[in-house]
């Protein structure tokens, strides 16, 4: 019997990163997987194959004109895709399309029952908007995934849970009017941190009001404050009873991350993964996909993601 968790790793995924000195470097996949193998986690999972996403699949979420701009910038290999956070590099279109392709193959495996859960450490690019790059994110693989779950797999009521230290604005606002996308987002208060969004009073618009939950944490908050916020998030998710779960488990909320000011430990990531496994079992036939998201200390992201993977594989 195959392992219940399928992990997406590849040379192409490992190349998602930016020029020397940029906070999002190309050594994140290697650092995580070396740590995972040292713990023996490689023996508990399936390393999954996938294909690069076709342009038509990417355009389920992204505007064609924006995709064309990424293709052009990828060929030129220079300049910026946004106002200065997200540089173009040679082949950036293809590398970003690999992230999307891995997400789509993960969805196929989970929906078909070939995998119980998936983990994509290099993924979860939650800042890109339908028509723009933002915050180190070329394509929003999560947005494409959500649209594809609906159009290709008939999955409508989806829970998107985000514990990255930065608010997942590219998912939240692009689906703000969507009553069938349930969002629970725990993040450092945007008064202090990029992208400056995610206020508690933002709960969705129109028919979607009440289907979104923002839980901003004060600068310097640690595990105690996080667990208290998580209890509220869990009660909210239980009431919403979604049929599919997606987790973006950014590691940049751990103490010592160079871009943020929370003081979490990997216990936060372990707890969320364990509780979502239980929620998914009750409401979604166990269907759960997990994405690594941010994290700019290699030691921290290795600890957090290994904690998540161990929980996914052994719980």
Image (tube, rainbow, N blue to C red):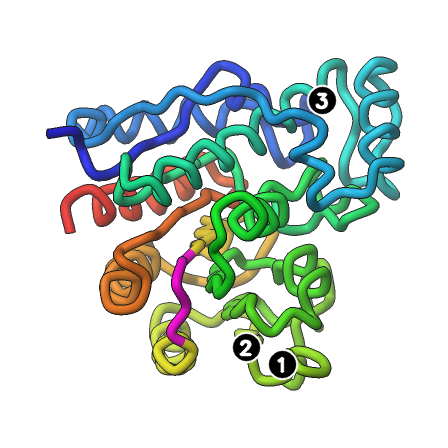
Q: Residue at x 82, y 44 (%)?
A: 132
User: Which of the image's four quarters has the N terminus?
Assistant: top left
**Which sits earlier in the primary sequence, circle 3 or circle 1?**
3
Q: How many marks?
A: 3
Q: In the picture shown, does residue 77 fall above or below 134?
A: above
Rendering coords of residue 271 (x, y %): 27, 62
Q: Which residue is drawn at 18% across and 33% down?
A: 3
Is residue 213 shown left or right of residue 143?
A: left
Rendering coords of residue 26 (x, y %): 56, 23
- Dividing the picture into quarters, in which one does residue 282 lie? bottom left
State the separation of the CA atoms marked 3 and 1.
34 Å
Q: In the picture shown, does residue 229 fall above or below 86?
A: below
| Discs 2, 1 touching: Cβ within 8 Å | yes
Location of mark 1 (residue): 203
Q: Residue at x 48, y 52 (%)?
A: 248
Rendering coords of residue 81 (x, y %): 84, 34
Location of mark 2 (residue): 213
Crowd around label 3: few <14 · some 14–19 · many ≥20 (10 Å): many
Could you tell me which secondary element the residue under label 2 belongs to?
strand
**Which sits earlier in the primary sequence, circle 2 or circle 3?**
3
Where does the magenta region start and end? 241-245
Crowd around label 2: few <14 · some 14–19 · many ≥20 (10 Å): many
Could you tell me which secondary element the residue under label 1 belongs to?
loop
On residue 92, which mark appears?
A: 3
Is residue 114 shown left or right of residue 130?
A: left
Q: Which residue is drawn at 58% across and 84% down?
A: 210
Crowd around label 1: few <14 · some 14–19 · many ≥20 (10 Å): many
On residue 295, which mark appears?
A: none
Viewer-proximal residue among 47 and 227: 47
């Amino acid at each position: 019997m195959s392992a219940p968790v399928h992990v997406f790793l590849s040379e192409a995924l490992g190349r998602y990163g930016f020029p020397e000195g940029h906070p999002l470097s190309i050594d994140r996949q290697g650092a995580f997987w070396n740590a995972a193998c040292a713990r023996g986690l490689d023996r508990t999972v399936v390393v999954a194959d996938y294909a690069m996403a076709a342009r038509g699949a990417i355009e389920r979420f992204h505007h064609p004109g924006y995709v064309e701009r990424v293709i052009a910038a990828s060929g030129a290999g220079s300049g910026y895709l946004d106002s200065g956070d997200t540089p173009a590099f040679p082949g950036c279109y293809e590398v970003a399309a690999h992230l999307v392709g891995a997400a789509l193959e993960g969805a196929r495996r989970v929906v078909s029952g070939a995998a119980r859960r998936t983990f994509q450490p290099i993924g979860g690019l939650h800042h890109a908007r339908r028509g723009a790059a933002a915050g180190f994110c070329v394509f929003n693989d999560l947005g494409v995934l959500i649209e594809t779950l609906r159009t290709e797999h008939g999955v409508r009521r989806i829970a998107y849970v985000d514990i990255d230290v930065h608010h997942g604005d590219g998912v939240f606002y692009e689906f703000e009017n969507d009553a069938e996308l349930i969002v629970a987002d725990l993040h450092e208060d945007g008064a202090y941190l990029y992208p400056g969004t995610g206020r508690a009073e933002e709960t969705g618009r129109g028919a979607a009001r009440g289907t979104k939950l923002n839980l901003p944490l004060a600068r310097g908050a640690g595990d105690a404050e996080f667990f208290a916020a998580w209890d509220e998030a869990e009660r909210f998710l239980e009431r919403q009873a979604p049929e599919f779960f997606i987790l973006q488990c950014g590691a940049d909320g751990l103490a010592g991350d160079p871009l943020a000011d929370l003081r979490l430990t990997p216990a936060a990531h372990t707890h969320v993964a364990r509780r979502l496994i239980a929620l998914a079992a009750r409401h979604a036939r166990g269907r759960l996909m997990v994405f690594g998201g941010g994290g700019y200390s290699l030691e921290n992201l290795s600890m957090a993601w290994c904690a998540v993977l161990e929980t996914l594989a052994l719980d």
